[in-house]
Image: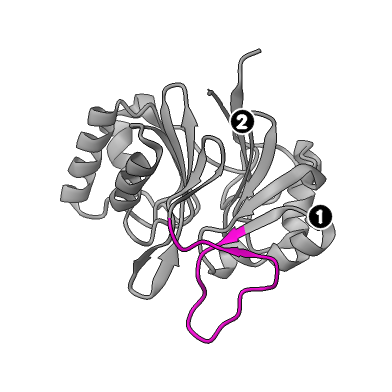
Amino acid sequence: MTRKLKLCILIDNSVAHLGVRSSWGLSIVGTYSGVQFLFDVGPSFSILRHNAEVLGVDLERIEFVVISHWHGDHSGALSDFVREYCRSCRIYVPPLTRGSIIPEGYIQVREAMEIVPGVYTTGPISVAGITEQSLVLRTAHGACVLTGCSHPGLLKILEVARRVSGQNVHAVIGGFHGFGFRGAEREEFLRFIEENDTRVVCPCHCSGEYLLRFLEKVRPDVLISGGVGRIMEFTI
């Protein structure tokens, strides 16, 4: 039986499926070799639950949750989700700001680590007072990288992901935080995906138009549109 990574966007700014609701934020549900997880939970528990029901996602099967960073559009639904669905699953979070307290039972991530075989967090990467982690999943063709907002810089995250996984980057999915405003950034990203033989770039949430419009012209073959309900599958 072929092992698979299956991803479905649960919360995003746009929709790709009838009956779901959009929201400014991000949440991606995945199944990696039978282990179901959430990457971010979005700002609204009611929207998260509604979209899961419409898309046929059983939130009670979630075994672990990874929060990219503590902004409300990525973590706002966490406490309600944990109370309703996650009494025994593991919650991996980046450090909070000084003086704040991580809720009891959450796992504070301080460095890159393997969560389950083949699935890693980059560990916290900080910039301008924002600490963020990304999720890295090994596949048969290279690493699949899930990003929250990419505050530390998309290319910096991808380089860390490549080092952590020991693979080139096959796919990058998530928020890119307006990356590509400067032409030099766009050209550097193009060099990166060509060197890595990257085949999937899926801008979501806060990504903006700069990189999207650039890739539409020079590498439309790698682009996949996001939106709630978008499903992607990879062989692992």
Q: Decide which of tag 1 and tag 2 comes sooner along the chain.
A: 2
Instruction: Specify the label residue 127 is tagged with.
Output: none
Where's residue 82, x and y in %?
A: 76, 61
Q: Which residue is mark 1?
A: 85
The single residue placed furthest to the top in the displayed view is 1
Where's residue 75, x and y in %?
A: 61, 64
Q: Is residue 193 above or below residue 12?
A: above
- Residue drawn at point x = 38 percent, y = 75 percent: 129
- In the image, is residue 96 part of the stretch drawn in magenta? yes
| Magenta portion: prevailing SS class | loop
Q: Amino acid at mark 1?
A: Tyr
Q: Quadrant of the N terminus?
A: top right
- The residues bearing labels 1 and 2 have C-alpha atoms spaced at a distance of 21 Å
Where's residue 99, x and y in %?
A: 53, 87
Start-end of magenta stretch: 92-111
Circle 2 crowding by C-alpha within 10 Å: few under 14, some 14–19, many from 20: some
Q: Is residue 184 visible?
A: yes
Circle 1 crowding by C-alpha within 10 Å: few under 14, some 14–19, many from 20: some
Q: Is residue 110 above or below residue 161?
A: below
The secondary structure type at the circle numbered 2 is: strand
The secondary structure type at the circle numbered 1 is: helix
- Residue drawn at point x = 50 percent, y = 70 percent: 95
Q: Which residue is mark 2?
A: 6
Judging depth in this view, the residue of 50 and 6 nearest the camera is: 6
